[in-house]
Image (cartoon, rainbow, N blue to C red):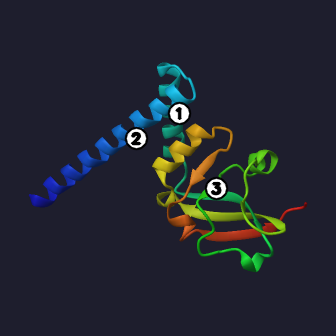
Amino acid sequence: MISKTIFKISDLLVLESEKSRDKHLLSVLQKTLDYSLEDAEEILQDNILYLAKLPQEIELYRIIYADNKKSINTKKPGSHFSNNKEKLLDNHEFTYGYGENRYLITVKVDKNQIDIDETLHNRILYQNENEITLKKKGAGAIIISIDKLPD
């Protein structure tokens, strides 16, 4: 009986946390980005559904600067990724790291490694970036490849 009570309380805490998150994101859309309430609700709902429909395993991409491949932290490849390689390569405005060379890191992660709250926040603030934010700076991500990009 106690475990059922704990489970129900934890469900309520999650729901309250999601309500608080959604209220904050709607406020950002309305006050910061000047959307109507109706448009803000639609954008938020679209992003929530998009994340819910992601497959259990997903390939993600990130561009960073580094002097060479060996200087890239493969245990924690970073938090900010995109699941759209073409858009990332065509429209990437921000890069991470320091060094002379640009690299495209491709990783495979389990869906539970995605920080849903931060991803929603970043997808709303930076709508053109197709952001997927990972927990723990990407710890646990499986590196598929690290490719040097042309200058």
Q: Position of residue 7 (x, y in %)?
A: 21, 54
Report the mark closest to the observer, 1 or 3.
3
- Look at the numbered disc 3 and give the secondary structure of its residue: strand
**Amino acid at the residue labelled 3:** Phe
How far apart are the alpha carbons under marks 1 and 3?
19 Å
- Number of residues whose C-alpha sits closer than 10 Å to that of mark 2, classed few (under 14), some (14–19) or many (20 or more): some
- Above or below: residue 79 compared with residue 44: below
- Above or below: residue 60 compared with residue 92: below
Q: Which mark is residue 46?
A: 1
Name the residue located 61 percent from the left edge and 70 percent from the top edge: 142
How far apart are the alpha carbons under marks 1 and 2?
15 Å
- Look at the numbered disc 1 and give the secondary structure of its residue: helix
Q: Are marks 3 and 2 in contact (CB under 8 Å)?
A: no
Using the rendered image of the protein, determine whether residue 32 is visible from the camera's viewpoint: yes
Residue 77 vs residue 140, the one in the foreground: 77
- Above or below: residue 121 compared with residue 64: above
How far apart are the alpha carbons under marks 3 and 2?
21 Å
- Number of residues whose C-alpha sits closer than 10 Å to that of mark 1, classed few (under 14), some (14–19) or many (20 or more): few
Q: Which residue is mark 2?
A: 21
Question: Looking at the image, which residue sits at the far bottom?
Answer: 70
Q: In the figure, is residue 141 to the left or right of 1?
A: right
Q: Which residue is mark 3?
A: 81
Q: Are marks 1 and 3 in contact (CB under 8 Å)?
A: no
Name the residue located 45 percent from the left edge and 30 percent from the top edge: 27
